Amino acid sequence: MTQWIKIFDTTLRDGEQSPGCSMNKEEKLEVAYQLERLNVDIIEAGFAISSKGDFESIELISERLKKPVICSLSRARKEDIELSARAIQKAKFGRIHIFLATSPLHMEYKLKKTPEQVLETAVESVKYAKSLMEDIEFSCEDAGRSDPGFLVKVLSEVIKAGATTVNIPDTVGYLMPAEYGDLIRYLSQNVPGIENVIMSVHCHNDLGLATANSLAGVLNGASQIECTVNGIGERAGNTALEEVVMALKVRPDIYGDRGTKINTKEISKTSRLVSNITGSVIQPNKAIVGANAFAHESGIHQDGILKQRRTYEIMDAEDVGLVEGKLVLGKHSGRHAFADKLQEIGFILTKEEIEKAFERFKALCDQKKEISDKDIESIVADEVYQAPEIYKLQYVQVIGGNTIRPTASIQLLKGDTLIEGAGLGAGPVDAIYCTIDKLIGEPITLVDFSIHSVTGGTDALGEVTVRIRDKAQIFIGRGSSLDVLVASAKAYIAAINRMLHFRAASSDRIKPTL
Ligand code: KIV
Ligand code: ZN
């Protein structure tokens, strides 16, 4: 009989904490719907007290989704717990997730509390949460660097107080797989009452070991894995959902009857959606979801694959939903066919959003022969998943070449006001970006610029992703077009719009301190 390992997805909370990956309410809902199709067990939808936007996103996701448990994060404080409970009030299945640090370093310098005070706070917070809701998770933040004896004390007391899941985070990605596995085994053997609750693993990837550590945890008694799509998250990220799920599936000889309920055929689509919405590009050699994960370059490998797939492939691309982009719709397809296709791919859009995407699709049909699912995903990301358009690109023209100084002429719309200008640059993209800086009246710090083609072929859509910095904050923008310079301009403006939107909304945002 399968021993189900619960998949707790925290893409919308820990994942969103990665630089530049913030999402708005509608974007979070779209990701949540896809996570539901992927069949995750729990969605951590946000940190209710951290901002009005986070609270509203959790509320919206709680109202709309009916299958997974919806969870909200809270510090071990009454006000956080109360707000989490309110945000998930309408969820069919709701969970409050409380965290409190237990390592000497965190207790002394960050919390400025003694271990006794931490223990008392942990118990009080769980008791309070339990008075509002049945399903309570408690996390010992920085458990990886905590004293195992102290963890035993805290965990046994929070279980007595009503916690139904206890989580053991390696918050700073410090432990080696054998150490983390030993810690999980020690806790599973020494915490009174642990057999009545779910023990969860939560690993960060600072040393590239998040997946290995999570799996070591599972082998030693954990039955919930906390992870994010594409492994996005603080610093080097969290455990990648797709990696742990496929490892459990591909290696039953190691993991025995442990399995997940994930519909693995939805993995690629989920990965692309998260990448498109957050603008975080997936490295080509990323396990499971990278562009090269199933590509065979060398002649020897290709020969082997043709003779017997298993010579160089340990899993089928189809198992993770990687099917060659089909020719989908053509020039003569109408709105209905297009809307049906969007639904089939998995997008749930408003009428206006469909209309916007349809206009763009029609324009693309005039220029490109074959349109695949990936093209449509890129169009939707470009037209729908953007911050409100404070600046809108009306027009961009660039003159360049090897005998001329690149010059850009640009028109932007700000509300009803048209602003236009021209400028020079070291290269065509520089000319565009310097001119946009001049038009909006502030120099922008460009941190990163990347470009890739959505599909193969010289007539492919070019997708540009930029990262800009405003003080300590990173903002990502992406844009796609058959013309890479137009895509470059769109991506830059999208990042600027995100930055301006963030500035305008920051009055409602608090940065929780402990
Ligand atoms: O990494 C961590 O410790 C966390 C907790 C809030 C669970 O994300
Ligand atoms: Zn974390």
Image (tube, grey):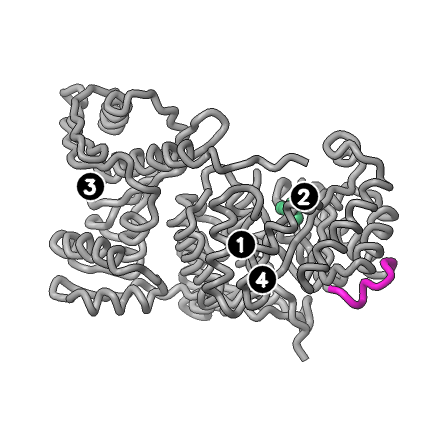
Spot occupied by residue 265 in the image (x, y as percentages of width and height): 45, 68
Mark 3 is on which residue type? Asp
Instruction: Count residues near mark 1 (Cα–Cα under 10 Å), then give few for <14, some for 14-19, many for 20+.
Output: many
Q: CA distance from mark 1 to mark 2?
A: 19 Å
Instruction: Single out the mark in the foreground, 1 or 3.
Output: 1
Secondary structure state at the residue bearing disc 2: loop
Q: Along the horizontal axis of the image, is 59 left or right of 273? A: right
Q: Residue 137, can we see it? A: yes
Q: Residues within 10 Å of mark 3 (few under 14, many from 20)?
A: few
Q: Could you tell me the amino acid type at mark 2?
A: Thr
Q: Amino acid at mark 1?
A: Ala
Q: Which mark is residue 45?
A: 1
Q: Which residue is mark 4?
A: 42
- Name the amino acid, label 4: Ile
Q: Which residue is mark 3?
A: 483
Q: Is mark 2 within 8 Å of ligand 1?
A: yes
For the residues carrying marks 4 and 3, which lies nearer the camera in this image?
A: 4
Mark 4 touches mark 1? (CB < 8 Å): no
Q: Nearer the viewer, mark 1 or mark 2?
A: 1
Q: Which stretch did the figure color magenta?
A: 190-197
Hey, which quadrant is residue 402 in on the image? Answer: top left
| Image point (44%, 65%), residue name | 266
User: Would residue 24 appear left or right of 401 to someone viewing this image?
Assistant: right
